[in-house]
Amino acid sequence: MKQLNRKQIEQRVLDLLDEHDVTSVPVPVERIARSVGLPIVETEMDADVSGALIRSGNLQGIAVNASQAPVRKRFTIAHELAHFLLNHVDKDHVDWQFTVIRRDGRSSEAEDDQEMAANFFAASLLMPKDILRQDVELHQRFDGEIHLDDADIGLLAKRYKVSEAAMKYRLQNLGFMSWA
Ligand SMILES: [Zn+2]
């Protein structure tokens, strides 16, 4: 199956936010997951497991490692929702921590693509481009440059209920911050 590119994924996310009448943050990712038919179960898992998309038999849902931080749980739910909506898998799928960074041969290259797509979808969903742009523009100076320091990123991360690392990466990805 052909992978969607970034622009197409951003559009899928905008449509999804629209369908669920989401116009503010934090994005109610659990409500969205439930309403597309994915109940969420928090359960004890190995420390290096983030969560899983369950699609075996008649059962369907998202399992989340109960011991993760709340912001990490939200990202995991968004990531599993992405696998579901992008039709990545038709059987159970388990996500380890830092799947994308792993290079231990656990996943094939095609799977890595799907992991990156799911991460991009999750970031786009939890930090919607248009809402984030409005927030970031509050930091724009008269010379047009945007200046965000660590405290600003911390506040944004709190507002969107995401980790500071995820917020920083999203800001850099959208060109609101340099990669330096
Ligand atoms: Zn995954």
Image (tube, rainbow, N blue to C red):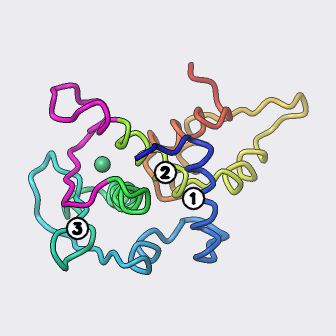
Point 63% across, 77% down: residue: 21
Q: Which comes sooner in the sequence, label 3 or label 1?
A: 1
- Residue 93 location, x and y as percent? 21, 55
- Position of 16 relative to 124 (above/below): below
Q: Residue furthest right?
A: 142
In the image, 148 versus 82, the foreground residue is 82
Q: Residues within 10 Å of mark 1 (few under 14, many from 20)?
A: many
Question: Badge 1 is on which residue?
Answer: 13
Q: Secondary structure at mark 1?
A: helix
Point 62% across, 65% down: residue: 15
User: Mark 2 and mark 3: span between their CA atoms?
Assistant: 20 Å
Q: Which comes sooner in the sequence, label 2 or label 1?
A: 1
| Left or right of 21 on screen, residue 45 | left
Magenta region, main secondary structure: loop
User: What amino acid is labelled 3 in the image?
Assistant: Arg
Question: Badge 3 is on which residue?
Answer: 55
- The span shown in magenta is 89-112
Question: Does residue 107 show up magenta in the picture?
Answer: yes
Residue 121, disc:
2
User: Mark 2 and mark 1: span between their CA atoms?
Assistant: 7 Å
User: Mark 3 and mark 1: span between their CA atoms?
Assistant: 22 Å
